[in-house]
Image (cartoon, rainbow, N blue to C red):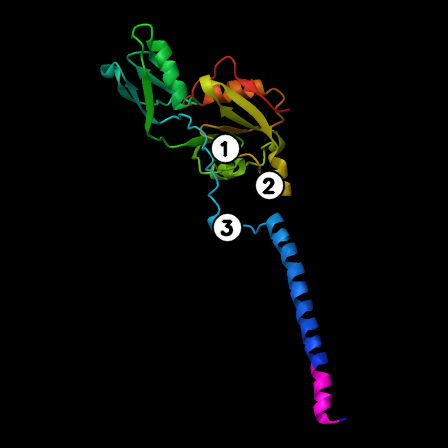
Amino acid sequence: MSPKMQHRMTFPWLLAAILVAALAALTATGCGSPRAGAASAQAPAAPAAALLPPAPPTAAPEYHINQGDELHVRFLYQPDMSEQVPVRPDGRISLASTGEISVIGLTPRDLERLIEERSATHLRNPEVTVIVTKLGEQRVYVGGEVGRPGYVVLRPDMTVLQAVLQAGGFRKTAKLDSVLLMTPGAGGRFAASRVDMEQVVQEGVPERVRLHPNDVIYAPPTWVADMNEVVDQWVRGLIPALPRVGVGYSLSGS
């Protein structure tokens, strides 16, 4: 067979092979495209973190009035009754429109409502705004079997042990598993709870309790069976700078 004849017979087969390969490639591409599109439609790509909206801010807890704060009490419709007053060491303020009021532990909104209620007897529709213009130094009291009983300055996230160390540390006579923490609330009431500091000091158990302004820590020499007596002795009697405890203080703990 001549070379010319061989070329004529080979060319159609070669052309057919090329066409078959091209069709196979197109078929594979065409079959894959819908599946890829469907997959992308079902699971869209996550947006970049920078494009996401910021998380909504969390509201800060309301401020509670403390000893040493200065308050501006403003009467909207009776401006001559407005006053700038300090919170005294006994936890009270004195206003011409209401007389003396115990304010430690109240929020400014609580105090606004209280002043409006008390002044409504001789003022017509009083509307009051209370603004804390100056923050007093926040402190806690550490007493009992510690090196230097007395006030220590409250630091952010301060724990019971940190406060006790500021007061000279526990004495050897302290009953560590019966330390009392007394926290003041509205109306001069205190809530008392027992804190096991023996686990913290001797076993290194992390502290979970954080202190608040005007908390009282009492390290007793023996196990405290009746926390009422300790609240009576320490809060009512031996710490006159703290607000007096009302008859309805509450106790918790075992």
Q: Please, is residue 190 above or below residue 247 in the view?
A: below
| Frontmost residue, 234 versus 51 | 51
- Image-quadrant location for residue 126: top left
Q: Tell me, yes or no, whether the two marked residues, 3 and 2, touch with CB atoms within 8 Å.
A: no
* Residue at the far left in the pictured view: 80
Does residue 3 sit above or below 244 in this rendering? Answer: below
Camera-near label (3 vs 2) is 3
In the rendered image, residue 226 lying in the magenta stretch gets the answer no
Q: Marks 1 and 3, Cα distance to the nearest angstrom?
A: 37 Å
Residue situated in front as seen by the camera: 33 or 182:
33
Tag 2: amino acid: Pro
Q: Which mark is residue 34?
A: none
For the residues bearing labels 2 and 1, Cβ distance under 8 angstroms = no
For the record, the magenta segment spans: 2-11
Instruction: Verify whether residue 4 appears in magenta.
Output: yes
Residue 103 visible, this angle: no
Task: Decide: is 47 above or below 17.
Answer: above
**Disc 1 residue crowd, few under 14, some 14–19, many 20+, Cα 10 Å:** many
Q: Which residue is mark 3?
A: 49
Neighbor class of circle 3 (other Cα within 10 Å; few <14, some 14-19, many 20+) is few
Query: In terms of secondary structure, where does tag 1 sit?
Result: loop
Residue identifier under label 2: 206
Assess disc 2: are there few (<14), some (14-19) or many (≥20) residues with their C-alpha within 10 Å of its C-alpha: few
Q: Nearer the viewer, residue 86 or 71?
A: 71
Which is closer to the viewer, label 1 or label 3?
Answer: 3
The spot of residue 24 in percent (x, y) is 69, 68
Q: Position of residue 220 (x, y in %)?
A: 57, 28
Q: Could you say where residue 242 lies in the image, as x and y percent from the top left?
A: 43, 23
